[in-house]
Image (spheres, coloured by chain):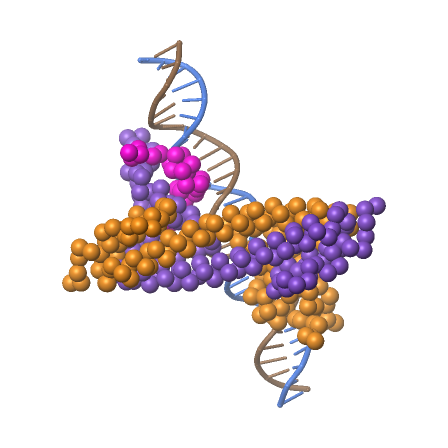
Chain colours: A purple, B orange, C brown, D blue
Amino acid sequence: MTRQNYRIGELARLTGVKSANIRYFEQEGLLPEPSRLAGGHRVYDRSLVERLTFIRRCRDFGFTHAQIRELTRLAGDDRRSCTEARDLAQAHLVEVRRKMTELQELQRSLEGYVDACNQICLGGPASNCSIFEDLGGERQKSTPIAGCCGTQAKP
Amino acid sequence: MTRQNYRIGELARLTGVKSANIRYFEQEGLLPEPSRLAGGHRVYDRSLVERLTFIRRCRDFGFTHAQIRELTRLAGDDRRSCTEARDLAQAHLVEVRRKMTELQELQRSLEGYVDACNQICLGGPASNCSIFEDLGGERQKSTPIAGCCGTQAKP
DNA sequence: CTTGAACTTCAAGTAACTAGAAGATGCAGG
DNA sequence: CCTGCATCTTCTAGTTACTTGAAGTTCAAG
């Protein structure tokens, strides 16, 4: 079995969220008040690792504390139905999928740029790359980057 | 052909970035100072739509203004090589791919939860869903959510 | 030439950290 | 038991990236 108790620093290492930030999350109501050692140090159990990882992921994709709080609070409230929690997760999911599409676009933009640059440019001035003609718009697979460094050699 | 000139409000509508935010981006050095009408109103051309869309996407995925500025500034500086811009884009890309993986995890967490909830729970109390046992950890495809709303009916 | 939407600048407010001070605690080795 | 030092505690202040609001100006349709 894995150990049951963690201090704030260990929790931080396990989840990739800084100690100061964990305290801030607690203050913001995203995390429950943990039990304490005699001297006041916070002690967490295993379940907090999962919970905090989930919160971190949500945060990393721009969900507000209000949204995260709403979702995580459901899990301790018997008066609110499971369906309600599911609907919230569902709404969350729609947004995640939208973000996914946007991220794919960004990825394709960057990939296309790096690819074309590898094939066509070899150390010419950056201004010739016309990076902004390609990044941000819809990518057309057919034509590579138009005037990318084709007209100028190294000095 | 599409029209050549846009005012800040139109640019805002086309890119999904608020006017106030566009002005702020300009102030932050992410966008060049645009030309002005006689009365001082900003005028942008078509290329700014692409440029701003790219900036918005980068921003939406947590890149700092410093990172975005670095990347976008290369495109106007002949003294810096194309390879340098490419390397920066490459580094950017690595981070985008990492974010992609994380986003997929989050998506799977939420999908798994919604699926299981649809199959097993039908209006029971949310606390029975044990949402945090599933969200945040590695998802095991085999077992659906364990004690999710199975033990309690509606009052 | 009037009217109203859209623009201008500037200042202040907010969300989510982030860093630093100043001191207390926990634990391992002597 | 004592020392030393990493880790913890609270508190305050600063940073980034917006966001809102005030007060006034400009543009374009009627």
Q: Is residue B22 visible?
A: no
Query: Quadrant where the C terminus of chain B lies?
Result: bottom left
Residue name at image x 42 percent, y 51 percent: B105
Does the stretch in magenta take in A23? yes
In this rendering, the count of numbered labels is: 0
Vertically, is B53 above or below D4?
below
> Residue A4 versus residue A70: which sits nearer the camera?
A4
In the image, is residue A152 above or below residue B39?
above
Residue at 33% x, 59% y: name it: B114
- Above or below residue A139? Residue D11 is above
Q: Answer whether residue A4 is magenta in the image.
A: yes
Q: Find residue B10 and report its image quarter.
A: bottom right
Q: Position of residue D4 (x, y in %)?
A: 44, 17
Q: Is residue D22 left or right of residue D12?
A: right
Determine the residue located farthest toward the right in the rendered image: A155
- Which stretch appears magenta? A1-30
Residue A130's image quarter?
Answer: bottom right
Instruction: From the viewer's side, name the closer residue of A3 and B119.
Output: B119
